[in-house]
Structure formats: structure tokens, C-alpha cells
Amino acid sequence: MAKDVIRPQNVHKYIHVPVAPKNAAANFVSQNLPLAAMFLKNKSLSWACAFFAVQSYLNEPYIKDPSDDSQPAIFRIIFSLVAIVTAYLDLLFPSMNTPVAALTQPNSS
């Protein structure tokens, strides 16, 4: 009776097909995060994009898809370093703007 349950025509060999990696969202974030850090001059955001760039550089040999045409990880590191320099640029060249409150108060002399 056990031979009737297993039929040769119902047995199929499993063939594993790995899923293609979907790095579109990660590529979008890693390419545009330094731009946001430069635009906002946000120091913590620029350090975060530097951390992500170094992480992607270290993981590139393991997760790089041959058909992936995104920018190389070394360019991401350079771009994140530019974002860090832009965030700290006000320390090198401080602004000489006068505060608005000093302009509106009458002179006490």
C-alpha cells in the first residue's frame, strides 16, 4: 500500500534558483545621502554616509552583481568625504553676517 502513495511521475527534483539581488533602493540612498548632507551641511548625516560608503566598499566583493551598473564603492567614499568637508567648511570660513537682532536694536549711546 505504501508503494501506491509514492508515484515516480509525481516526484520532481528540486533545483535551487537564487533570487537576483535588488539593490535599487540601497543604491539610491547611498548615492543621494551625500548630496543631502552637503545641501543641509549636516555633520551627523555626512558621517553616516561615510560609514555607509565604507561598509559598501568592504562588502562590494561579496554582493556585487556583474550586471549592476551602479557607481563603484570607492566613488561613494570620495563623495562622502566631500560631504564631510562641506559640512565642516564653516569652521574654515566663518560667515561674517551680522545678526538681525543687532540691526534692529537702537544704539544705546
Image: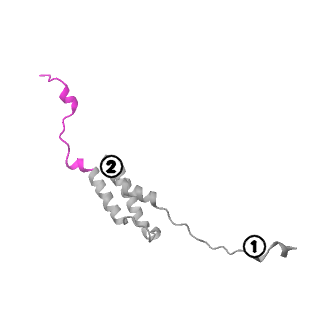
Q: Residue at horizontal 17%, vertical 40%? A: 96
Element under disc 2: helix
Residue closest to the eye, 24 or 51: 24
Q: Is residue 47 magenta?
A: no
Residue closest to the eye, 15 or 90: 15
Which residue bears the numbered disc 2?
Answer: 43
Element under disc 1: helix
The kind of residue tagged 2 is Lys
Q: Is residue 98 magenta?
A: yes
Q: Residue at horizontal 50%, vertical 65%? A: 21
Q: Residue at horizontal 38%, vertical 62%? A: 54
Q: Residue at horizontal 66%, vertical 73%? A: 14
Give how far apart the Cα atoms at labels 1 and 2 are. 62 Å
Find residue 6 and report its horizontal and vertical position in percent: 80, 74
Find residue 100 and report its horizontal and vertical position in percent: 22, 31
Q: Which residues are magenta?
A: 88-109
Find residue 2 and report its horizontal and vertical position in percent: 85, 74
Marking on residue 10: 1
Task: Please determine whether, in this image, residue 73 is positioned above or below residue 1.
Answer: above
